[in-house]
Image (spheres, helix red, strand yellow):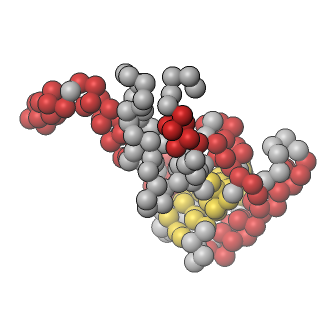
Amino acid sequence: HGCLDPAFIDYVSGLSMSPSVLLVSLGVDMDLSSYPVITHHLDREFEVVIASNADPALAPPGMASVLLMASADHSDFPPRGTQEYLNTKKELAEQVIEKATELIPELQNQIVVQDVATPHTFERYTGIPEGAIYSFDQSVGTKRPYFKTPIRGLYLASASTFPGAGIEAVVISGRICASDIMGWPEARRLRQRSSRS
């Protein structure tokens, strides 16, 4: 922390994290090709994604790869590795599967393989605090860290910086950094050359 301005540390420390999700991944013995790829449940806290309808290679013929996502908070889960955590994870997954079965009849009876990820899972595998799937809060008015840091030559390009989370935003973040490092006029010339070829 010695190299950083205390105001910068306070600013970053004060940023809120985005929400997380409970993600239930299913392989089901059902042909769901007539369903849309994404379906939002009426309460908008729940989403069904039939991934194999976007990419048929994700499931054998006549079967489907289904992702069920429900809003979840890191604090809703007991510590990872405890029996209480496993019980909570199982109970919430069952609730989400029941909800999805309202949209896709017989779904819960056709599950071949199942995996469940909680905010703790996302935190464990990505290192993002609270398993915040979009890193810092995405609300309007949230000022994410700028690509330049107070340390000369240290740049930030990620879902945690401006302009935000998502593939397109992260690519833009990287381009902003690269353009600044190369000098903005040079970056423009390179883009113009590549668009002509």
Q: Is residue 36 left or right of residue 196?
A: right
**Image x and y of residue 57, in percent:** 50, 46
Q: Is residue 21 left or right of residue 150?
A: right
Residue 27: in sight, yes or no? no
| Residue at (60, 56) in percent of width and height | 19
For the C terminus, the image quarter is top left
For the N terminus, the image quarter is top right
Q: Nearer the viewer, residue 36 or 34?
A: 36
Q: Residue furthest left?
A: 196
Q: Residue furthest front?
A: 6
- 105 versus 83 height, above or below: below
| Residue at (41, 35) in percent of width and height | 157
Residue 21 is drawn in which quadrant? bottom right
**Image x and y of residue 140, in percent:** 43, 61
- 111 versus 8 height, above or below: below
- 126 versus 101 height, above or below: above
**Image x and y of residue 129, in percent:** 64, 42
| Residue at (38, 22) in percent of width and height | 152
Q: Nearer the viewer, residue 139 or 122?
A: 139
Q: Is residue 194 left or right of residue 140?
A: left
Q: Residue furthest right?
A: 83
**Image x and y of residue 166, in percent:** 44, 48
